[in-house]
Amino acid sequence: MSQSETSNEQPIYKRKIRSFVTREGRLTKGQAKALETYWPTMGLEYAQGMQDLTQAFDQEGPVVLEIGFGMGHSLVQMAADAPDTNFIGIEVHRPGVGACLMEAERQDVSNLRIYQHDAVEVLENCIPDASLSRVQIYFPDPWHKKRHHKRRIVQPAFVQTLRKKLKVGGHLHLATDWENYAEHMLEVMQDAEGYQNLSDSSDYVPKPDYRPETKFERRGQRLGHGVWDLLFERVN
């Protein structure tokens, strides 16, 4: 086929598979006020492009990034408990971002910055390589129906993106309350180049002290649900 024939064809765009569904939800008055008041100092804009993380915070220190923080209570608690560490949270849902900002102000937390954007795009275009001490993904959507498993965020290509952003010696910490997803995560991570499992039994680890136990998690445990933590180190 000649060049002139192909030049008139419409480009074909492959639809991106996302690990989340956008559901805006309604902001409470408190969440709306927190977004208006605190986003200018705690928000990071995707449009700013690659971040200089030493300038994004008021202090130097290790940087921990959490993907999908929900309403943000455990993330804020971690930031409050580790004031010398800098935390970045990524969440697509605006009410969760507003709730996180409210809680950060309530606890007088200043070592936290937030993106409201797709985590894959933030990682690719805003986070420098080898800049993170830990990445944490807690209780992501399990997409439990088999036909939806391709939407799970923990996939081989994605954990290699995370590996590039971690420092050598940095940690990837995953947690889920779905056993099938835990098995999927373990399979992906055991096959992932450049990672070492920090589990003594080569599978799961006890919950690290730095990860707060959520109300959702405690409720699940009362109902007999399990929780699985995976901790892997970037070794090269």
Image (spheres, rainbow, N blue to C red):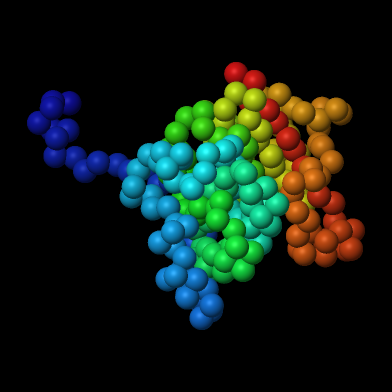
Q: Residue 227 placed where, x, y %?
A: 81, 49
Figure check: 202 above or below 119:
above
Image quadrant occupied by the N terminus? top left
The residue depicted at 83 percent of the width and 65 percent of the height is 219
User: Quadrant location of residue 224?
Assistant: bottom right
102, 92: nearer the viewer: 102
Q: Residue furthest top?
A: 236
Figure check: 66 above or below 6:
below
Is residue 180 among the parts visible in the rendering? no
Q: Residue 152 placed where, x, y %?
A: 60, 46
Figure check: 205 above or below 96:
above
The residue depicted at 42 percent of the width and 71 percent of the height is 36
User: Quadrant location of residue 202?
Assistant: top right
Q: Residue 63 placed where, x, y %?
A: 57, 40
21, 24: nearer the viewer: 24
The residue depicted at 54 percent of the width and 64 percent of the height is 101
Please state if 234 lies on the left or on the right of 224 as rendered. Answer: left
The residue depicted at 40 percent of the width and 61 percent of the height is 40
